[in-house]
């Protein structure tokens, strides 16, 4: 097994990303977040944006999954070969890209993109998919890893409040390449269950590295409890 894949087997990878316009949308901040989760035991990092990747690569020696979110079309996760080559050049060990069946902006097929990345950079490629069929196709196209990253985030895939663990289990059972569980994994129990279902590793982002979302969860729970208390109080 590839040493990078062996290093993350059965372990946690943390996605260190912030959305545009947020206070934490800063490469230095994301690098500090990556260093923090490394101190907490993360076996690998997933990050987006060339400057973020460069800084994290310089700071840490953990396996680094890199991507570049760009554009406003359906395919925006490392959408073209040019993006993929730039991600590799910024220090990513594994290049993550959209692995769905949707057309890519540069007109290349997934297989053509994967092959070019492997030939020109020697990096591994992770295909982010949303369905079982896409996972099978991505493995057939030569992807070294398949992630459930986009499950529930395409119009035709099954969504829900939590991760699609059934998809994780089916792909882990049937694919000849490692499957990475990712997407809406919000608790340690869900992460552990993904591993039990066969995932090679699990990626957690929002629940660890996105304070706005975490705060919102707690704030909504507190407000809900307050409203419930009022409605069940003494009357008459």
Image: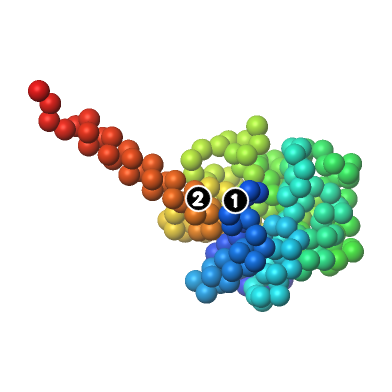
Q: Would you say residue 147 is visible in this rendering?
A: yes
SS at badge 2: helix
> Which residue is at 61% across, 64% downward?
29
Label drawn at residue 212: 2
Left or right position of 137 against 118: left
> Which residue is at 74% across, 68% downward?
54
Task: Please state which of residues 160 and 17 is positioned toward the viewer in this rendering.
Answer: 17
* Residue 227 place in picture, x, y as percent: 28, 35
Q: Which mark is first along the chain, 1 or 2?
A: 1
Which quadrant holds residue 11?
bottom right
Task: Judge the density around disc 1: few (<14), some (14-19), many (≥20) Cα neighbours within 10 Å.
Answer: few
Q: Which residue, as the protein is rendered here, is positioned at the far left? A: 236
Check if mark 2's residue and mark 1's residue have beta carbons within 8 Å. yes
> Which residue is at 65% across, 52% downward?
147
> Which residue is at 22% across, 30% downward?
231
Label drawn at residue 199: none
Task: Please state which of residues 114 and 167 is positioned toward the viewer in this rendering.
Answer: 114
Quadrant containing the C terminus in the rendered view: top left
Left or right position of 156 against 207: right
Left or right position of 58 against 17: right
Quadrant containing the N terminus in the rendered view: bottom right
Question: Does residue 207 sit above or below 153 in this rendering?
Answer: below
SS at badge 1: loop
Task: Please state which of residues 104 and 59 is positioned toward the viewer in this rendering.
Answer: 59
Which quadrant holds residue 24?
bottom right
Question: Does residue 119 sit above or below 35 in this rendering?
Answer: above
Label drawn at residue 22: 1
Question: What is the CA distance from the residue labelled 2 to the residue labelled 1?
Answer: 9 Å
């Amino acid at each position: 097994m590839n040493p990078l894949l062996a290093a993350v087997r059965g372990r946690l990878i943390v996605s260190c990303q912030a959305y545009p316009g947020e206070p934490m949308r800063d490469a230095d901040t994301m690098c500090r977040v990556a260093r923090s989760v490394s101190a907490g035991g993360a076996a690998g990092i997933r990050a987006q944006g060339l400057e973020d990747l460069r800084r994290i690569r310089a700071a840490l020696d953990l396996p680094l999954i890199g991507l570049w979110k760009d554009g406003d079309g359906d395919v925006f996760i490392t959408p073209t070969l040019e993006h993929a080559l730039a991600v590799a050049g910024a220090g990513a060990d594994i290049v993550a890209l959209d692995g769905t069946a949707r057309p890519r902006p540069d007109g290349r097929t997934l297989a053509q993109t994967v092959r070019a990345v492997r030939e020109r950079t020697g990096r591994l490629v992770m295909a982010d998919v949303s369905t079982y069929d896409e996972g099978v196709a991505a493995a057939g196209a030569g992807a070294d890893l398949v992630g459930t990253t986009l499950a529930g985030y395409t119009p035709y895939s099954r969504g829900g409040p939590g991760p699609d663990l059934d998809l994780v289990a089916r792909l882990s059972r049937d694919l000849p390449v490692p499957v990475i569980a990712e997407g809406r994994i919000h608790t340690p129990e869900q992460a552990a269950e993904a591993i039990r279902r066969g995932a090679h590793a699990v990626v957690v982002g929002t629940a660890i590295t996105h304070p706005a979302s975490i705060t919102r969860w707690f704030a909504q729970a507190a407000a809900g409890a307050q409203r419930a208390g009022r409605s069940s109080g003494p009357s008459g």
